[in-house]
Amino acid sequence: MAQPYSARSRAIEPFHVMALLARANELQAAGHDVIHLEIGEPDFSTAEPIVRAGQAALSAGHTRYTAARGLPQLREAIAGFYASRYRLNIDPERILITPGGSGALLLASSLLVDPGKHWLLADPGYPCNRHFLRLVEGAAQLVPVGPETRYQLTPDLVERHWDAGSVGALVASPANPTGTLLHADELAALSRTIKAHGGHLVVDEIYHGLTYGVDASSVLEVDDQAFVLNSFSKYFGMTGWRLGWLVAPPEAVADLEKLAQNLYISAPSMAQHAALACFQPETLEILEERRRAFAKRRDYLLPALRELGFRIAVEPEGAFYLYADISAFGGDAYTFCRHFIETEHVAFTPGLDFGRYQASQHVRFAYTQDVPRLAEAVERIARGLKTWTAQ
């Protein structure tokens, strides 16, 4: 009899929403009109200037490996973006282009986490973060957070949960699933606390650009030694192109480059050439128009769900999610989500996908549909609440 598969593979949990998505797709294939509010992917297709640049790259034969750190001209373009948007002077040599934000997380966790060590992570949070740590034989120390800290880690929480196995903390701003930000003073305070323990601060800035009424501060404004994960997927709308980046302290670059060479050789070359168009004024205007559309969606859906009885204690300032407490309705989140798929054909995500703390009483809505479609979803949810019986 064959040996069982690895303990690491057994420890990594699936996305629970995928079973719900599969059912939603079955219903859609059967002719039902399903409203998808479950997947964290912008509904806009990649902006036309980026598509044209990708097509031109293919026509020009840019289909070979690049250097492991990525195209020099793309790293320079990203550095220029930091200069124009954050007034930061980032050496392009500190930037590594990765296969999606996930590639950046893989590099950072491989570099910073030894077997048996751990990072502090907010619970709720993006599930792949803890799974990447398990992949490198480290662990996530999940710290329960709620509305009182806007679902973010604080210096006090770091002090209370730091132990002998802690080597750093990973925070997200804006955060998935809550959409909350860490502002410059909060990032600075976290940085001081973690440095006092000899640890590393890693910040997921993947939803930067998608903020509403406020600009997100980069941790690099207050801590030049922090590690920053970012992606072309969300603000730049390049989800399927699989492209991200990591900004690291200068002394870490050589080891990160070595890891990149071995883990994935290089990020997709065609996507890198296409991404050069992301920073053109024509493209940025399209992306800013989309940001305004997301703001309108948030401003519609947030009060509409609250009116129905969903408790959304903290107004999200970024990303495109609403994290809602359903305890007023009774029952558990997975059964609740299943009810709305089956009866009203509206799909959203149970809190179980984002951690353990109060997960069974929360759901996440992704406002990745236009306002008329969201209005239809709200109408259906209102109807579905009348037939919901807590189980």
Image (cartoon, grey):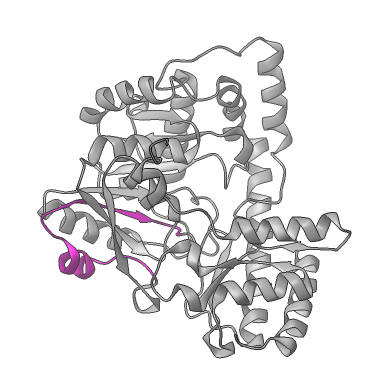
Residue that appears at 37% across and 26% down: 92
Residue that appears at 63% across and 63% down: 295
Does 228 appear in magenta? no
Does 158 appear in magenta? yes
202 in relation to 97, above or below: below
Residue that appears at 39% across and 54% down: 217
Q: Which residue occupies the foreground of this view, 85 or 343?
A: 343
Number of numbered discs visible in the structure rendering: 0
Residue that appears at 48% across and 15% down: 66
- For this view, does 190 lie left or right of residue 369? left
Q: Which residue occupies the foreground of this view, 77 or 37?
A: 37
Q: Quadrant of residue 321?
A: bottom right
262 in relation to 154, above or below: above
Q: Quadrant of residue 255?
A: top left
Of the 4 image quadrants, the one containing the N terminus is top left
Residue 149, given in percent of the width and then of the height, sits at 34, 74
